Amino acid sequence: MTNSTSDAIFARRSVRAYTAQKVDDETVGLLARTALAAPSGMNAQPVNVIVVRNRALIEEAEKAVIAFFVKTGESAVVDRIKSRNNKIFYDAPVCFFLAVKNHADADVGIAAENISIAATGLGLGSIILGLPRVIFNDPETAAYWKGKLGFPDGCEFGLAVAAGYAADTGKPHDIDLKKISFID
Ligand SMILES: Cc1cc2nc3c(=O)[nH]c(=O)nc-3n(C[C@H](O)[C@H](O)[C@H](O)COP(=O)(O)O)c2cc1C
């Protein structure tokens, strides 16, 4: 048994290469709204969506993320980033920054997944990104980036989701059905 929603869930995968094709405004707006439609604890709706299509800004953030890991000497992460062509946002034409109140990590994760699944359903690739968090670690750089991105007061970085048309041929990860158990 399948339906279009479960098909999109099983087809979703993290896309780390994008074509230069732009995503039209209507689609971008729809994806942003899917984040706001996510459930949240006590219906607090703590997530704000900041849609970034400004390449220069995304590239500046990318450089800042990499510089953080180089500076802190986290060589495993630096090597992993190198193996991904020094990309953090993978040249995606649009990035959704999810700014969240009250450290509502579960809520922000659900919002991010809504965007990713909807993107898959619309024929787009996407990837949920946690690494950009590091540019919000230090109060000074956090203030800079919150200002640049226009975070509402009281919001912290939650996650980012990059999206666009996939330029790779990856596959969804294998799932281990032994992780499901039933108690009837
Ligand atoms: C909360 C979260 C943060 C993630 N952060 C990153 C990231 O910063 N960079 C990246 O390349 N992938 C990131 N990923 C993608 C995971 O690596 C990916 O989901 C995982 O390898 C499984 O692959 P799949 O999404 O293709 O099924 C993140 C995923 C999640 C859920």
Image (spheres, grey):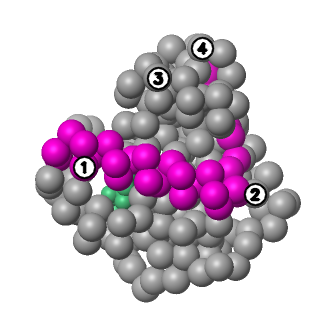
Residue corresponding to mark 3: 140
Quarter of the image for residue 165 reads: bottom right
Residue 100 visible in the displayed image: no
> In front of the other: label 2 or label 4?
4
Asked if the residue at tag 3 contacts the one at tag 2, i.e. Cβ–Cβ closer than 8 Å, the answer is: no
Looking at the picture, does residue 171 appear above or below residue 184?
Answer: below
Q: Which tag, 3 or 4, sits closer to the chain's start?
A: 3
Q: Which tag, 1 or 4, sits closer to the chain's start?
A: 1
Q: CA distance from mark 1 to mark 3?
A: 18 Å
> Which residues are drawn in magenta?
45-74
Q: Residues within 10 Å of mark 4 (few under 14, many from 20)?
A: few
Residue corresponding to mark 1: 70
Residue 143 visible in the displayed image: yes
Which kind of residue does numbered mark 1 sit on?
Answer: Val
Q: Which tag, 2 or 3, sits closer to the chain's start?
A: 2
Looking at the picture, does residue 148 appear above or below residue 101?
Answer: below
Which kind of residue does numbered mark 2 sit on?
Answer: Val
Q: Does residue 153 appear to the left or right of 161 in the view shown?
A: right
* Mark linked to residue 28: 2
